[in-house]
Structure formats: C-alpha cells, structure tokens
Image (cartoon, rainbow, N blue to C red):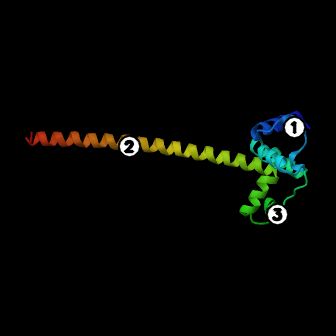
C-alpha cells in the first residue's frame, strides 16, 4: 500500500470516526461487514477516484451496458453513468474535468452577459437623462416655465 493510500485510509477513518488502531491497512472494498461499509463510504467521500480503483481491484466490474456506453457503442443511460462514476476512475476524472470546464465557461458567459446588461443600463440611463434635459429645454423655450 502506498503512502498516499495509507493517508487516504487515515483520513477516511477520521471522517468515519473510527479508531485507526483497530483497522488494517488494506483495501476496505475487499472486506465485508459494518465497519467495512463505513470505511468504504468514507473512502468514497475523501477520494472517489481511488474508491473506484479499489472497487475494481476488489473484483467489481462494469456491466456490459456501461462498458459499451463508455466505448460509444451504446447509449449512456443514467444507470451506466452512475456505474462508470462508481467503478471507472478515469471516467470519473474526465467527467469532473468536463464539468469544471463547463462551469468555467458558464461563469464566463454570465459575467459577459452581466457586463453587457450593465452597459445597456448605463446607455439607457444616459438616454433617459438626455430626454429629460431636452424635454426641459423644449418646455423652457415654449415658455412653459
């Protein structure tokens, strides 16, 4: 077990509020029972990519539907997406990168839209003030004041 994996197990034990002196430095997905399920859940919270890798190392495999969807042969259903997120660390990482990129693009688009709106409001306010000044001048010329 690598240093990174040991640190992950320590963090997961802390998250799960379990005593690390009572745990073994092994893949919790190879174990069964309440403590194992608690550690599995904690590992998923701390590092979902390693959790996915450990699930595969423990013998879990993708369904035919999920494998075919990953290859683009079959439609990506919600169930297949969920399975890929759970069992395929590279799919999960790519998905997270795509989501971050989309979020950045959306934020950038929103910021540009807000700038355009602020500019439009400023132009509209300027035109309104100009219209009021002109109305006041026209009224003064006609002797209305």
Residue at left offset 52%, top offset 42%: 111
Marks 1 and 3 sit apart, C-alpha to C-alpha, by 41 Å
Q: Which residue is mark 2?
A: 121
On screen, residue 54 above or below 2: below
Q: Residues within 10 Å of mark 1 (few under 14, many from 20)?
A: few
* Nearer to us: label 1 or label 3: 1
Residue mark closest to the camera, 1 vs 2: 1
| Neighbours of disc 2 within 10 Å: few (<14), some (14-19), many (20+) | few
Q: Position of residue 47 (x, y in %)?
A: 78, 42
The reply, left or right, for residue 56 in relation to residue 41 is right
Secondary element under disc 1, as helix, strand or loop, is helix
- Residue depicted at 88% across the width and 33% down the height: 3
Foreground of the two, 67 or 48: 48
From the viewer's perspective, is 61 left or right of 135? right
Mark 3 packing: few (<14 Cα in 10 Å), some, or many (20+)?
some
Q: Which quarter of the figure has residue 46? A: top right
Horizontal arrangement in the rendering, residue 102 relative to residue 69 (left or right): left
Kindly report the distance in space between the C-alpha atoms of the residues bearing marks 2 and 3: 51 Å
**Which image quadrant for residue 66?**
bottom right
Q: Earlier in the sequence, mark 1 or mark 3?
A: 1
Residue under label 1, please give it.
Answer: 22
| Residue marked by disc 3 | 68
Is 90 in front, or is 31? Answer: 31
Residue at figure coordinates x 15%, y 42% from the top left: 138
Q: Earlier in the sequence, mark 2 or mark 3?
A: 3
SS assignment at label 2: helix
> In what element is the residue under mark 3?
helix
Whether residue 67 is situated above or below residue 98 in the rendered picture: below
Mark whose residue sits in front, 2 or 3: 3
């Amino acid at each position: 077990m690598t240093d990174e994996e040991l640190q992950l197990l320590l963090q997961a034990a802390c998250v799960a509020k379990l005593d690390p002196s009572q745990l073994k430095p092994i893949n919790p997905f190879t174990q069964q029972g309440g403590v194992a399920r608690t550690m599995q859940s904690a590992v998923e919270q701390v590092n979902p990519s390693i959790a996915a890798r450990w699930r595969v190392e423990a013998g879990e495999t993708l369904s035919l539907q999920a494998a075919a969807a990953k290859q683009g042969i079959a439609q990506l259903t919600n169930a297949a997406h969920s399975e890929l997120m759970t069992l395929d660390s590279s799919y999960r990482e790519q998905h997270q990168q795509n989501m971050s990129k989309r979020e950045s693009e959306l934020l950038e688009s929103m910021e540009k839209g807000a700038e355009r709106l602020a500019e439009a409001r400023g132009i509209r306010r300027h035109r309104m003030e100009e219209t009021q000044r002109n109305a006041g001048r026209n009224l003064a010329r006609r002797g209305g004041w």
